[in-house]
Amino acid sequence: MGTDTNKRSKSVMISAAFLLATSSIGPSFMTQTAQFTAQYGASFVFAIVCVIIIDIIAQTNIWSIIGVSGLRGQEIANKVLPGLGNFLICLVSTGGFFFNIGTVGGMSLGLNALCGLNQKAGAALCGLLAICVFLSKNANAIVDKIAKALGGLIIVIMVAICFISKPPVGQVAVRLFTPENPGGMFFSMITMLGTCCGGYIAFAGPHRLLDENYGGAEGDLQHFRKTAWTGISVSGSVRMLIYLCALGVCTVGGTFVAENATAIATASNPAAEVFRLAAGNIGYRVFGLALFAASLTSAIGTTYTSTTFLKGLHPFVARHDRWFSCGLILVPTLILSFIGRAKEGVLLGGVANGLILPISLSCMLLACRNKKIVGDNYKHPLWLQLLGWIVVCCAAYLAVLSFPSLLALFK
């Protein structure tokens, strides 16, 4: 009996970790990393490492508070200040909606790279596929299996292309500590924050654990933290691998090749262009499959988590959660099917969620010493709390500075 319980515990932990990771490793994640690497070259490693550190701090805080309280994000916020949870629901759901524009766009970009399908037609087909998943009676089980399988597939593909592209690792190590024009990377950093831990993403994994009756009990805290760190390790590793793949394509013998960088930065599908330049048409097709798969899991994670927030608004939503899930996919699908511009939609999804991060993390930090929420015995580490507030300030500052760049996307 004890062995079965341990196996279930590990399975649930891995599923939640990969839900976090695959929710992050979506089209925005891949497009951003490829496009910004082409723009900033080896120096972009500085921005990536900064974002990973911020991700660890933010998610450790959020997962800890949810784990020790056994409450969902919106429930915690409402206990901090009546009505605050409802405000958070609106923010996260809106962010999830914009993020789904990116995920459906990513699926269409993936199909375009895989088989040349028109992006608008691809968006319609992909939206229909995601809706079918949520109409299934076993949606949660499907989410778990897809997250695990495709998370592993993406890592294998990235490692293979990284070896082919031969990035200048020594140059990367130097630029980590001596980046060129670090101030120019503000927009890229807030965009990446959105796909790492912004909006719904930080809540995807812990809400999944709550659905499996974890949280609020003694010993659950470490379970939540280990799961968070596992998911962050997976997503951080994949981001670094995509960066190295793109950098390898943009450099030859340590020299930056402007022609390749321009081809990636101006491509309608920047991440797929990296793989085409590295491994020809075969690499381009294979990456199309990986991007489609990653976008599908990200769309599922976005919709699942946004719906767990919407349930807190009214019992009507809880009774008809499947249809609300379908709506969160259907509307972005219609937008992309008629308007197109999938690349801009992908970037918009990341930025929108990055703007939400300072607010959602603030809610959790305000709750960390509230005994009505975390109990009498829990002591949230002061250093973790202080680092959390630093992240809030940095994310808010980056959001303000990046706003003009966000508007420029659609000029």
Image (tube, helix red, strand yellow):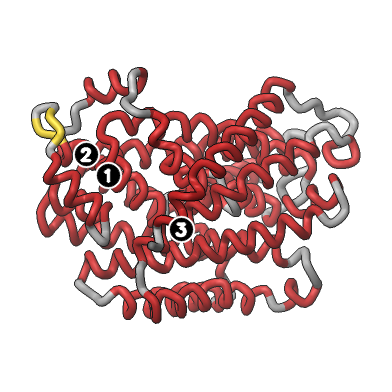
Q: Secondary structure at mark 2?
A: helix
Quarter where residue 114 is shown: bottom left
State the CA–CA distance, disc 1 to disc 3. 24 Å
**Callout 2: few (<14), some (14-19), or many (20+) C-alpha neighbours within 10 Å?**
many
State the CA–CA distance, disc 2 to disc 3. 27 Å
Say if mark 2 contacts mark 3, CB within 8 Å.
no
The residue to which callout 2 is attached is: 162
Residue 7 in view (yes/no): no
Instruction: Tell me the amino acid under the disc marked 2.
Output: Cys
The residue to which callout 3 is attached is: 348
**Picture coordinates of residue 70 (x, y %)?**
77, 46
**Picture coordinates of residue 119 (x, y %)?**
30, 73
Quarter where residue 237 is shown: top left
Q: Secondary structure at mark 1?
A: helix
The residue to which callout 1 is attached is: 158
**Viewed as shown, does residue 139 lie left or right of 278?**
right
Q: Is residue 64 above or below residue 292?
A: above
Say if mark 1 contacts mark 2, CB within 8 Å.
yes
Q: Nearer the viewer, residue 409 or 366?
A: 409
**Picture coordinates of residue 38 (x, y %)?**
25, 42
**Callout 1: few (<14), some (14-19), or many (20+) C-alpha neighbours within 10 Å?**
many
Count every numbered label the image shows and give the total.
3
Q: Tell me which residue sits at (19%, 27%) in the image.
A: 168
Instruction: Tell me the amino acid under the disc marked 3.
Output: Leu
Quarter where residue 326 is shown: bottom right
Image quadrant containing the C terminus: bottom left
Earlier sequence position, callout 1 versus callout 3: 1
